[in-house]
Image (cartoon, helix red, strand yellow):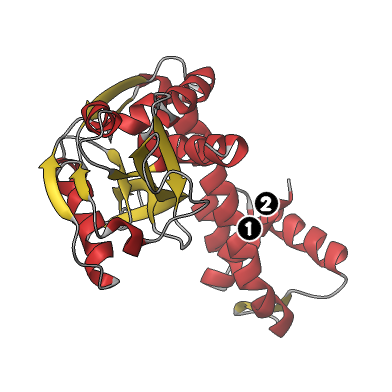
Amino acid sequence: MSLVKYNAMLKVIEHNSITKAAEEIGYTQSGISYMVKTLENEFGFPLLIRSKEGVIPTENALRLKPVLQKMVDTQEELESLIQDLKHAALGTIRIGSYNSMLLTWLPQILKKFYQKFPDVDVKLVEGMDPELVEMLKNGTIDIAFTANTAPEGFKFMKLASDPFQLIVPKGHDLASKEKVTLDDVARYKLVLPNENYFNWITNYLDTHNVTGPQFSYQLKDSTAIISMVANDLAITILPKRSLSAVPDNVVVKDFSENYSRVLGITYPDNKQMSSIISAFLTTAKEVVNKKEL
């Protein structure tokens, strides 16, 4: 195999000695000499200058060294990953998520993930951004579906944008508009979700100098919020992916401008990421990109 010869050549360059290279990797001197000679024949130019004192790599050999090293390292990384994946069945992954993602993305992602790793133990924890971030920091969970950014010490893999939408009762003044603006919202009562969504939405309103909405209610459950809207008690702004089911007596309107959050997965910024987490991130990306959930 060429990679064996590449590694032998790298050891000869490192030690400036065929003898020392042979001792380190467990080959005979004649075996190392044969591999170097084979490479010289394959490449079409000398790789070593031989003398009584030992061997010296040629200029071409030194130019090849970083490329040969990269190929050997890649092969070792591949073999290590293959072994990790073979043993992934013994592992556990703890995932934090919003309720809305538990209803939409996660079932399909987990279905595909289990097809590849049927014996991995997956544990799910429900929460919102502040709770999930805290659980990541204290090690209660391994990864989390979150929005927008990751805290220090973690990375964020974007999966998709999630636009905010306006939900109004059927027959409402804004129900007939093709698209709405934030200014349209200013003169109506709003019922908004829990603190996390509430902060996002109020920040959007403040950033665009929209004043006037009355924040009449703040509820945790999106079903309860929709019920308030359906009974003409208020209107609301919710992320599109949190709307698992919308009754016939409400109307969902898009905004004329793009107001959205970015959804993704937050995971530890660690070069030694486990193969199970890496495989789950890859699966999540594949499912979301394919289904455009």
SS assignment at label 1: helix
Q: Which residue is mark 1?
A: 71
The residue sitting at the top extreme is 119
State left or right for residue 88 relative to residue 143. Answer: right
What amino acid type should be assigned to the residue bearing mark 2? Leu
Number of numbered discs overlaid on the protein picture? 2
Please name the residue that numbered disc 2 is placed on: 3
Indicate the quadrant containing the N terminus: top left, top right, bottom left or bottom right: top right
**In the picture provided, is 71 more to the left or to the right than 113?**
right
The image shows residue 178 at horizontal and vertical percentages of: 53, 51
**Looking at the image, can residue 151 be seen?**
no
Relative to 66, residue 212 above or below: above
User: In the rendered image, which quarter is residue 104 located in?
Assistant: top left
Q: Residue drawn at (33%, 56%), measured in percent from left and top?
A: 148
- Residue type at numbered disc 1: Met
Q: Residue at x 22, y 31 (%)?
A: 228
Alpha-carbon span between mark 1 and mark 2: 7 Å
Does residue 108 lie above or below 170 as drawn? above
> How dense is the environment of label 2, judged by Cα within 10 Å: few (below 14), some, or many (20 and up)?
some
Quadrant hosting residue 210? bottom left
